[in-house]
Amino acid sequence: MRSVQQKKGCEEYSQRIQNIINTKILGDELDPLHWKCPMTEDGKSIGSINLNNTHVRVILNNMEDLIELCISNDEGKSNTNLPLENTMQQRW
């Protein structure tokens, strides 16, 4: 049962990633990109993501929504109190 729930959760998470990339970062609501987030064969995790250099640079320059997705819980509340902007600036 847990395996089915894990797979469903991963599918929902990958759909949210796809939506952000297709409608906010590499496309928009009126002209979305049609990129699909790769999954492993068992569907329990995200597979390797391979993009061209131009797309990678655009994503890196516009990561805020992806970062928010990664650190928020199901209710949309942040799971961390880290000063995200300062942390990202220090790493880049």
Image (spheres, rainbow, N blue to C red):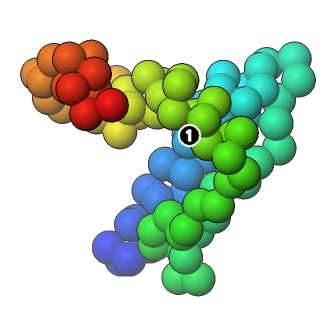
The residue at the point 87 percent across, 17 percent down is 30
Front residue (pair 92, 88) = 92
42 relative to 9 in the view: left or right: right
Q: Quadrant of residue 24?
A: top right
The residue at the point 73 percent across, 30 percent down is 26
Relative to 68, say whether 52 is above or below: below
56 relative to 13 in the view: left or right: right
Q: Is residue 4 visible?
A: yes
Front residue (pair 53, 81) = 53
68 relative to 12 in the view: left or right: left
Q: Is residue 74 visible?
A: no
Q: Quadrant of the N terminus?
A: bottom left
Q: How many marks?
A: 1
Q: Quadrant of residue 82?
A: top left
Q: Position of residue 49 (x, y in %)?
A: 59, 61
Name the residue type under label 1. Arg
Q: Position of residue 92 (x, y in %)?
A: 33, 31
The residue at the point 54 percent across, 23 percent down is 62
Number of other residues with Cα within 10 Å of mark 1, as a class: few under 14, some 14 to 19, many 20 or more: some
The residue at the point 78 percent across, 26 percent down is 27
Location of mark 1 (residue):
16
Asked which secondary structure carries label 1, the reply is: helix
Q: Position of residue 33 (x, y in %)?
A: 82, 36
